[in-house]
Image (cartoon, rainbow, N blue to C red):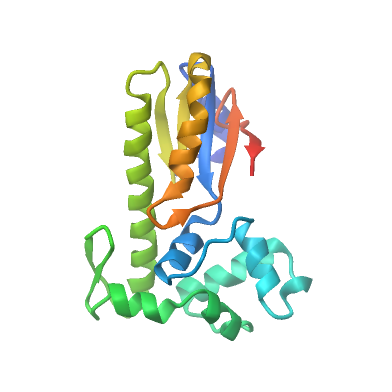
């Protein structure tokens, strides 16, 4: 995860190509799910932009940055009311933090003060979700020539042999269908990790 992006092209598959499966806005989608909200099947940052009053003048990146500042730094947001309708931070804290310890839906217990509690709930839940999917995809690939190369944050990178291309549809379905519902997924491929081209977004 700390490997500089400019050197990523050095990392090459042992088989024919890399396929990267990546959740669109994994942390925000996890918070939506924990808030008992429906998942949008479009880019979540664009969805946020459309649902925030007056945000249409902002770029996607500006909306994304402002929401993460509100989410993790507890900064007051100009669209506070709109955001709280979409992401119920208080409900999530009440359910998964007892004032001293976070207990996630994966039964992880993490000591946390109020400043860190939401961050720990979301990021721990998101990480376990990815690990759960890695195990499922590992099982699908168990008798194949392809294998999981590595994971980075909320993505899984598969070292794909062309003989196994037929199985990719099943793998994409498995990855996007989470215990919280269907998460929008992007798929990228390439001959090295530094040059991945988007196939599905």
In the image, residue 108 above or below residue 94? above
Q: Is residue 69 left or right of residue 147?
A: right
Task: Please name whichever residue, 192 or 37, is drawn nearer the observer in this view of the structure.
Answer: 37
Tell me if residue 100 can be seen.
yes
Q: Residue at x 49, y 61 (%)?
A: 29
Q: Residue at x 70, y 80 (%)?
A: 53
Coordinates of residue 199 in the picture (x, y in percent):
65, 35
In the image, residue 144 above or below residue 139? above
Please identify the residue farthest to the right as the structure is shown. 57
Tell me if residue 154 can be seen.
no
Q: Residue at x 60, y 66 (%)?
A: 65
Q: Is residue 102 left or right of residue 65?
A: left
In the image, residue 201 above or below residue 109? above
Coordinates of residue 76 in the picture (x, y in percent):
55, 84
Q: Residue at x 52, y 44 (%)?
A: 22
Numbered circles on residues, count: 0
Q: Quarter of the image containing the C terminus?
A: top right
Coordinates of residue 87 in the picture (x, y in percent):
50, 74
Coordinates of residue 44 in the picture (x, y in percent):
60, 60
Task: Please name whichever residue, 94 or 37, is drawn nearer the observer in this view of the structure.
Answer: 37
Q: Is residue 144 left or right of residue 56?
A: left
Q: Quarter of the image containing the N terminus?
A: top left
């Amino acid at each position: 995860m700390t490997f500089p992006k400019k050197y990523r092209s050095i990392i090459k598959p042992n088989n024919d190509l890399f396929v990267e499966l990546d959740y669109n806005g994994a942390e925000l989608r996890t918070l939506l799910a924990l808030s008992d909200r429906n998942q949008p099947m479009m880019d979540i940052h664009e969805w946020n932009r459309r649902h925030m009053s007056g945000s249409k003048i902002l770029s996607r990146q500006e909306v994304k940055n402002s929401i993460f500042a509100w989410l993790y730094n507890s900064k007051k947001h100009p669209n506070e009311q709109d955001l709280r309708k979409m992401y119920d931070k208080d409900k999530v804290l009440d359910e998964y933090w007892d004032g001293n310890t976070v207990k996630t839906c994966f039964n992880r217990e993490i000591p946390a003060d109020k400043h860190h509690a939401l961050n720990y709930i979301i990021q721990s839940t998101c990480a376990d979700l990815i690990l759960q999917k890695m195990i499922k995809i590992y099982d699908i690939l168990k008798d194949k020539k392809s294998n999981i190369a590595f994971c980075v944050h909320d993505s899984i990178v598969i070292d794909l042999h062309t003989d196994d291309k037929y199985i990719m549809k099943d793998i994409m379905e498995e990855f996007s269908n989470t215990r919280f519902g269907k998460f929008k997924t992007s798929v990228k491929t390439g001959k090295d990790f530094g040059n991945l081209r988007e196939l599905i977004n």
